Image (spheres, rainbow, N blue to C red):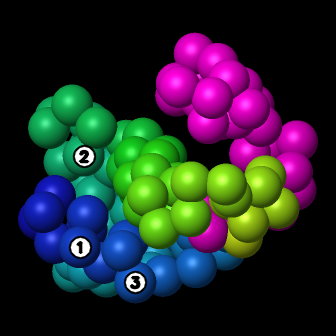
Amino acid sequence: MISEIKEALKTVDLETVKPEDMPHYNELSGRTWRRYMRVNGVTFRDMVNQERKRRCLEALTANPDASFTDLTEACGYRDKESTQRAFKQWFGMGLKEWQAQ
């Protein structure tokens, strides 16, 4: 089930995605679904953030000079500030520093 959710996240708008949009959610109660995720050591939010990071790297691979505006759109964030915060958390540096490497 975890791998199916990861695959489904690759095709949805991460800005508006909810657990209810994921495979198997309607087959189980919401509580049972969350417990299954927790038992497997992951939360829905963690999975969304992993997909955002994957999309960020994909966007930077396609365009190494991408701006935060480009990354905000690619990663499904609502604003540039959220993207900047996430980028620094993921990579331990700002976009300009990362691009200079």
Residue beneath the point at 70% across and 35% down: 95
Residue beneath the point at 87% across and 56% down: 79
- Tell me whether the residue at label 2 lies in contact with that at label 1, contact meaning CB atoms closer than 8 angstroms: no
Name the one closer to the observer, 91 or 30: 91
Q: Which mark is residue 79?
A: none
- Tell me whether the residue at label 3 lies in contact with that at label 2, contact meaning CB atoms closer than 8 angstroms: no
Circle 2 SS class: helix
Span of residues in magenta:
74-101
**Residue tagged by mark 3?**
11
In the rendered image, the vertical position of residue 80 relative to residue 43, given as above or below: below
Nearer-N-terminus badge (3/2): 3
Q: How far apart are marks 2 and 1 (CA)?
A: 15 Å
Residue beneath the point at 82% across and 61% down: 69
In reply to whether residue 83 is colored magenta, the answer given is yes
Q: Is residue 62 left or right of 41 when viewed as pictured?
A: right
Q: Is residue 73 left or right of 52 when viewed as pictured?
A: right
Crowding at mark 1 (Cα within 10 Å: few <14, some 14-19, many 20+) = some
Residue beneath the point at 74% across and 45% down: 83
Circle 3 SS class: loop
Q: Is residue 77 left or right of 75 when viewed as pictured?
A: right
Q: How far apart are marks 3 and 1 (CA)?
A: 7 Å
Q: In which quarter of the image is the N terminus?
A: bottom left
In the rendered image, the vertical position of residue 42 relative to residue 29, given as above or below: above
Numbered marks: total: 3
Nearer-N-terminus badge (2/1): 1
**Residue tagged by mark 2?**
37
**Residue tagged by mark 1?**
7
Name the one closer to the observer, 39 or 44: 44
Q: Where residue 76 sits: x, y (%)?
A: 65, 66
